[in-house]
């Protein structure tokens, strides 16, 4: 029987509870998420950035784990034994070659671990020196970026939130630092700080790190925070006029609390991107300073110092220059591509 279209009677069938299938079809709720989760999902869709991140992780893990299990040390001269004459056959070995005593052990039936990249002019295993050099370069890059992040974020947030004379004073300091020639100032500061710090850290735990590395961190703290502070300042200048910030000020909240709870969390995309792009810059700076002899202290290797040492025998042993150059290029390229992927994933303006 057909129902009357203009009847005022209620249709009882319209009030029957929906089944689970009907609910799932009609109500398509998006699961709760956060800005960070959305950024990670977009980052994982970027194949280039994902592969770059995997390469960085593999190099980092290799530089940490391999020195623990490798049978050779980065500073051990294989041809030198106490009370015995120096065995020069270990010097300048080609990849997978052996010294005289190692050949005798092989003939006697012993297993001798090969020198994958050969040895250097002092008879030290070159593979473990490259691995250890990558560890030093990565450590300098990460720690220098953390120093730049802390200083730049602190100064930039203060300048952006306070404004007025405080902002004017800080920005004039930033302009002065920007006007200085970067490479010249880095070389001069590294040389001067090396001379000043040597007597101060002698006999202390910092002596193991070396004056060159400490001076390098000081150089980053003095010169390389300006870009980060400008970015943070620009973000906070645009955010401090928002309603939620004005409401916090009206309710009597302190400036430091507003910066920590409201302003900096909303600058997190800029912080992540800038920090990721700062790491390859720090690694490159450490590499060319080590290449000039102002980096790590001998016998500790760095990728830059290994390339510098390889210049003398470039025609006879070109692999000693090519290998650290390839590792530096791979690390810096992977970090730059990963930083670009972070920018594309976490910058809200690009995803608007």
Image (cartoon, rainbow, N blue to C red):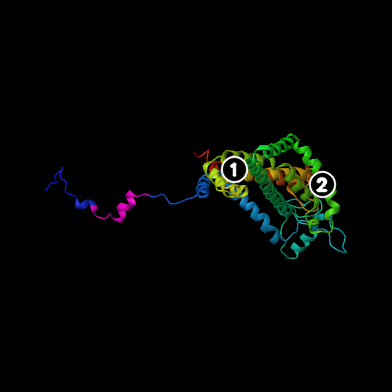
Q: Residue at x 75, y 37 (%)?
A: 182
Judge by depth and name the residue closer to the eye, 165 or 350: 165
Cα separation, mark 2 vs mark 1, equals 32 Å
- Contact? badges 2 and 1 (CB < 8 Å): no
In terms of image quadrants, where is residue 266? top right
User: Residue 297: percent from the left, percent from the top?
Assistant: 80, 51
Indicate which disc residue 144 carries: none
Q: Secondary structure at mark 1?
A: helix
Q: Is residue 17 magenta?
A: yes
Q: Is residue 318 magenta?
A: no
**In this view of the protein, can residue 239 be seen by the observer?**
yes
Judge by depth and name the residue closer to the eye, 90 or 127: 127
Residue at mark 1: 270
User: Residue 281: percent from the left, percent from the top?
Assistant: 68, 42
Residue at mark 2: 193
Image side of residue 120 versus residue 328, left or right? right
User: Residue 81: percent from the left, percent from the top?
Assistant: 84, 62
């Amino acid at each position: 029987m057909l129902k009357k279209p203009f009847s005022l009677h209620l249709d009882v069938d319209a009030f029957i509870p929906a089944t689970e299938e009907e609910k799932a079809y009609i109500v398509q709720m998006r699961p709760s998420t956060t800005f960070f989760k959305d950024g990670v999902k977009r980052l994982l869709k970027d194949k280039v950035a994902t592969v770059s991140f995997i390469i960085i992780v593999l190099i980092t893990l290799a530089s940490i784990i391999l020195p623990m299990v490798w049978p050779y040390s980065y500073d051990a001269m294989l041809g030198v034994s106490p009370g015995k004459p120096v065995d020069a056959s270990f010097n300048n070995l080609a990849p997978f070659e052996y010294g005289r005593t190692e050949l005798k052990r092989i003939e006697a039936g012993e297993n001798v671990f090969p020198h994958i990249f050969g040895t250097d002019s002092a008879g030290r295993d070159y593979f473990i020196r490259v691995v250890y050099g990558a560890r030093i370069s990565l450590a300098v890059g990460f720690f220098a970026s953390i120093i730049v992040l802390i200083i730049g974020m602190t100064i930039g947030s203060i300048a952006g939130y306070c404004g007025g004379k405080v902002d004017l004073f800080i920005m004039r300091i930033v302009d002065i630092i920007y006007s200085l020639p970067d490479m010249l100032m880095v070389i001069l500061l590294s040389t001067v700080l090396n001379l000043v710090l040597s007597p101060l850290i002698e006999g202390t735990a910092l002596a193991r790190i070396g004056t060159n590395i400490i001076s390098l961190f000081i150089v980053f703290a003095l010169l390389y925070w300006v870009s980060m502070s400008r970015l943070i300042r620009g973000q906070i200048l645009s955010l401090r006029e928002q309603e939620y910030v004005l409401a916090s000020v009206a309710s009597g909240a302190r400036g430091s609390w507003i910066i920590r709870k409201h302003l900096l969390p909303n600058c997190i995309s800029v912080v992540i991107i800038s920090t990721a792009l700062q790491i390859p810059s720090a690694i490159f700076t450490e590499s060319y300073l080590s290449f000039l002899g102002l980096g790590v202290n001998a016998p500790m290797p760095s990728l830059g110092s290994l390339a510098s040492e390889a210049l003398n025998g470039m025609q006879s042993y070109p692999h000693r220059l090519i290998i650290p150059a390839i590792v530096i290029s791979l690390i810096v390229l992977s970090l730059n591509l990963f930083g670009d992927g972070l920018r594309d994933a976490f910058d809200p303006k690009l995803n608007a």
